[in-house]
């Protein structure tokens, strides 16, 4: 069993801690019935191999000082995403994304010369419909298909798929949303593809396209779910 947690001292110095075996089980069992203050950082230690002795919830002066420094707002500091726990496997992709990637404003991302993945918070102002909000893809892949002048035996139009390396009529609409996003430091366009868009909109692109095939018309379900919303 493996558990990934973050340690933080009163000076806000953070360290990643990987717990194995009985240490991991001890913390996991404790978290099931107690408030867990969970943090994740860049540096790490482990309860296995070359490690110091790790004390769980000790009664020490600086620990009491740290507890006293926490805001008295009755809000529990706890892990709100069970996917961040890892039992025998690595932490989830979602947990790793938000925990291990640096958070920047849009302006900082634009000004950055570093190639990487970042987390940002902004409000979607508009969805660009000039370049369409969906695309036709192969039913078996996410890749865009190209129209041809050919038809199949049932007189359905055929499309060429580079991945399949053949023409067929098994195509489906998928989301490709170009969102203009703003925060208090700047604005930029973000591309939202099918899986993420569908999780937010709660409808497939195929459903919405069947209702209205006008590329310049943004489906109401998309507008309600995304425009003027912050993510």
Image (cartoon, grey):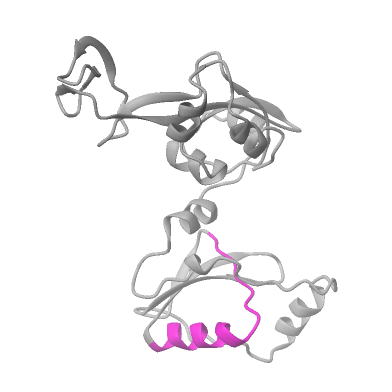
Q: Quadrant of residue 226?
A: top right
- Magenta stretch, main secondary structure, is helix
Q: Quadrant of residue 71?
A: bottom right
Q: Quadrant of the N terminus?
A: bottom left
Q: Position of residue 92 (x, y in %)?
A: 43, 60
Number of marks in picture: 0
Q: Is residue 150 magenta?
A: no
Report the residue that reaches farthest toward the front. 154
Residue beneath the point at 34% across and 69% down: 89
Magenta part of the chain? 22-41
Q: Position of residue 58 (x, y in %)?
A: 63, 90
Task: Choose between 225 and 45: the one closer to the eye.
Answer: 225
Residue beneath the point at 69% across and 89% down: 60
Task: Choose between 216 and 97: the one closer to the eye.
Answer: 216
Residue 96 vs residue 12: left or right? left
Task: Choose between 226 and 3: the one closer to the eye.
Answer: 226
Residue beneath the point at 36% across and 24% down: 136
Q: Position of residue 209 (x, y in %)?
A: 47, 27
Residue beneath the point at 45% across and 25% down: 134
Task: Choose between 144 and 180: the one closer to the eye.
Answer: 144
Q: Is residue 54 above or below residue 180?
A: below
Residue 107 vs residue 150: left or right? right
Residue 195 vs residue 74: left or right? left
């Amino acid at each position: 069993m493996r558990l990934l947690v973050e340690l933080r001292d009163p000076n806000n110095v953070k360290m990643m801690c990987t717990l194995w075996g009985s240490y991991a089980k001890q913390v996991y069992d404790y978290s099931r019935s107690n408030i867990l203050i969970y943090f994740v950082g860049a540096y790490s230690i482990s309860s296995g191999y070359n490690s110091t002795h790790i004390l769980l919830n000790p009664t020490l002066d600086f620990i009491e000082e740290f507890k006293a420094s926490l805001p008295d707002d009755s809000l529990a500091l706890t892990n709100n995403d069970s996917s961040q726990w890892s039992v025998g496997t690595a932490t989830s992709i979602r947990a790793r994304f938000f925990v291990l990637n640096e958070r920047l404003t849009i302006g900082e991302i634009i000004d950055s010369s570093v190639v990487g993945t970042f987390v940002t918070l902004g409000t979607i102002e508009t969805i660009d419909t000039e370049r369409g909000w969906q695309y036709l893809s192969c039913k078996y892949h996410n890749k865009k298909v190209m129209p041809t002048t050919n038809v199949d035996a049932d007189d359905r139009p055929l499309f060429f798929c580079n991945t399949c390396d053949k023409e067929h009529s098994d195509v489906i609409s998928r989301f490709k949303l170009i969102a203009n996003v703003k925060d208090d430091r700047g604005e930029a366009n973000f591309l939202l593809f099918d899986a993420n868009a569908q999780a937010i909109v709660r409808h497939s692109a195929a459903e919405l396209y069947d209702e209205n095939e006008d590329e310049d018309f943004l489906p109401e379900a998309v507008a309600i779910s995304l425009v003027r919303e912050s993510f």
